[in-house]
């Protein structure tokens, strides 16, 4: 649905130029929720602006729903953007317009007749949980309600792609969870393909099927969240499950990633009992990802290389992902 192929973007020229995107490629499948995570200045916002053609890449191509959007202009570009909804960090609502009028705006601009606009807005407001708020003004709404209006506005034209630029970073944690759950439900119900730009790991944990990590205009790693959790030295895996510094114990140190049903198994107790190892737990983190208990545990395995090697082989034979740290 979204294909970004080797795009680059530079601002300025000469010694003062800034490389915002450096040979970036990614692919988002239809119906997928894809997160792009990174700190400020990583290039995330420039990336999303090239996908809806608010920015033109210096090189490379951006294809959305089969169209090379980076080549479109005029009426063809406007038509393509009609298929791409956008939600923003700071809502971008017009304070002088009611909720109804804010959501209607894009339909009004494209010439949709008034009765059709009204019917569509009523449908969308119910979908995002804002029944009875059509006549309210933005100043009368909470932050979460304002973002729901932003989502409703993005969905008014019935797009197949939804872009989100830090849409939850101005919200409190509970409202963030509600908005993320709404986006996930809308993706399933409407068949939306969603690209989320964020610096918050909680966003990736809660809703993303796949993710990419960006830094200094480049993608450092990407893939499904599940595969990245079981990739050695994964930046995303380490960020999702931070375990702190590795102590210098002089013994073998490993990390085990648990996913789904394996999280309920007495793995550590069995390891100590079967191999006679005094297992030390150096750190652990557990989260719910896609409805499954998922976590990472750092263990110290004292003993000979042969003994610890057998223990590691045993863990791997149980289908666990084991990474030898030292």
Image: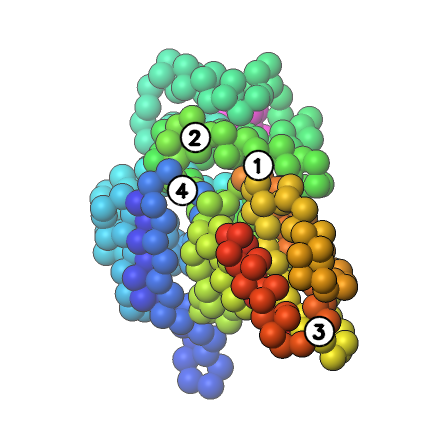
Tag 2 near tag 1, CB within 8 Å: no
Q: Position of residue 166 (x, y in %)?
A: 56, 49
Q: Is residue 29 above or below residue 183?
A: below
Name the residue that disc number 1 marks: 291
SS at badge 1: loop
Q: Position of residue 271 (x, y in %)?
A: 67, 57
Asked whether 299 or 301 is in front, the reply is 301
Q: Badge 4: how crowded within 10 Å, few (<14), some, or many (20+)?
A: many
Residue 13 horizontal side relative to residue 66, left or right: right
Mark 4 vs mark 3, CA separation in Å: 46 Å
Q: Badge 2: how crowded within 10 Å, few (<14), some, or many (20+)?
A: some
Asked whether 145 or 259 is in front, the reply is 259
Q: Badge 3: how crowded within 10 Å, few (<14), some, or many (20+)?
A: some
Name the residue that disc number 4 marks: 32
Question: In front of the other: label 2 or label 3?
Answer: 3
Mark 1 vs mark 4, CA separation in Å: 16 Å
Q: Residue at x 27, y 60 (%)?
A: 61
**Colouring:** rainbow
Indicate which disc, 2 or 3, sits on the residue closer to the N terminus: 2
The tag on residue 303 is 3
Indicate which disc, 4 or 2, sits on the residue closer to the N terminus: 4
Q: Is residue 166 visible?
A: no
Quarter of the view holding residue 302: bottom right
Q: Is residue 118 above or below residue 148?
A: above
Question: In front of the other: label 4 or label 3?
Answer: 3
Q: Is residue 100 magenta?
A: yes
Tag 2 near tag 3, CB within 8 Å: no
Name the residue that disc number 2 marks: 188
SS at badge 2: helix
**Magenta region, residue range:** 96-102
Q: Position of residue 246 (x, y in %)?
A: 72, 72
Q: Position of residue 319 (x, y in %)?
A: 51, 52
């Amino acid at each position: 649905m979204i294909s970004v192929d080797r795009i680059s973007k530079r601002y300025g020229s000469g010694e003062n130029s800034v490389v915002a995107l450096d040979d970036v490629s990614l692919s988002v499948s239809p119906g997928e929720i894809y997160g792009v995570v990174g700190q400020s200045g990583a290039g995330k916002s420039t990336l999303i602006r090239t996908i809806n053609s608010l920015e033109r890449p210096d090189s490379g191509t951006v294809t959305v729903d089969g169209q090379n959007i980076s080549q479109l202009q005029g009426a063809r570009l406007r038509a393509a953007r009609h298929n791409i909804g956008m939600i923003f960090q700071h809502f971008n609502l017009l304070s002088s317009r009611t909720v109804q009028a804010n959501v209607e705006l894009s339909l009004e601009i494209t010439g949709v007749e008034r009765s059709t606009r009204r019917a569509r807005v009523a449908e969308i407001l119910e979908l995002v949980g804002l029944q009875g708020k059509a006549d309210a003004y933005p100043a009368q709404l909470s932050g979460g309600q304002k973002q729901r209006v932003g989502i409703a506005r993005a969905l008014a034209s019935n797009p197949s792609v939804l872009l989100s630029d830090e849409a939850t970073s101005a919200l409190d944690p509970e409202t963030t969870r509600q908005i993320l759950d709404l986006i996930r439900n809308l993706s399933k119900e409407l068949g939306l393909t969603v690209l989320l730009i964020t610096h918050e790991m909680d966003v990736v944990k809660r809703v993303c099927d796949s993710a990419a990590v960006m830094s200094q205009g480049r993608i450092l790693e990407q893939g499904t969240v599940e595969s990245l959790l079981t990739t050695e030295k994964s930046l995303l895996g380490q960020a999702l499950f931070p375990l702190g510094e590795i102590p210098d114990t002089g013994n073998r140190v490993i990390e085990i990633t648990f996913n789904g049903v394996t999280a309920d198994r007495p793995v550590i107790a069995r390891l100590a009992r079967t191999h006679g190892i005094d297992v030390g737990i150096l750190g652990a983190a557990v989260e719910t990802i896609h409805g499954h208990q998922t976590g990472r545990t750092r263990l110290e395995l004292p003993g000979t290389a042969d003994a610890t090697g057998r223990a590691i082989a045993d863990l791997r034979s149980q289908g666990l992902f084991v990474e030898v740290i030292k």
